[in-house]
Image (tube, rainbow, N blue to C red):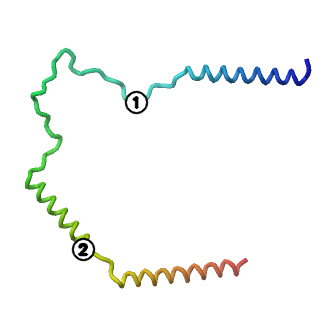
Amino acid sequence: MSAQQNNHSATLRFALFAVAALALAGCTSGPSAGVPQEGALRTGVYPNFGIMPRGETKQLTFEEKDQIAGTLSSAKARQGAVSASGSSRAEIEAQKRRMQAEADATLKAIEAGQ
């Protein structure tokens, strides 16, 4: 048997071993994670649908609901009434110019150092 055939045979055996190992690894499973499954709590008893469930917290009355809705709508109206003034735009432009000048100065300092 030549060296090339021997090498080919070894490669084929390795490939078959790797495929077999992967196939066996697919059959294993890790530990079961999550919440343990529970069965029914009251077996042998018919459910009673006549009992109304209670709320977990105190429910809002209609008056409280109307008061909160009014507060929110007035806050929304106040927020919508605020508009940007012209002076703030000028301040923004001035700040942009200052930042650009600072960036140019920093760039010149870096280039001068090289």
Q: Are marks 1 and 2 in contact (CB under 8 Å)?
A: no
| Quarter-of-image position of residue 20 | top right
**Depth order, front residue of 54/11:** 11
Q: Residue at x 46, y 81 (%)?
A: 95
**Quarter of the figure with the N terminus:** top right
Image: 70 above or below 37: below
Front residue (pair 59, 12): 12
For mark 1, does the 10 Å Cα neighbourhood hold few (<14), some (14 to 19), or many (20 or more) residues? few
Amino acid at circle 1: Gly
Q: Which mark is residue 34?
A: 1
Is residue 73 found left or right of 110 in the rendered image?
left
Where residue 102 appears, x then y in whole percent? 56, 81
Residue 57 screen position, x and y as percent: 16, 44
Image quadrant where residue 26 sits: top right
Q: Earlier in the sequence, mark 1 or mark 2?
A: 1
| Amino acid carrying mark 2 in the image | Ala
Q: Residue furthest top?
A: 44
Q: Which residue is mark 2?
A: 81
On the image, the x and y values in percent for residue 30 come to 51, 25
Within 10 Å of the Cα at label 2, are there few (<14), some (14-19), or many (20+) other Cα atoms? few
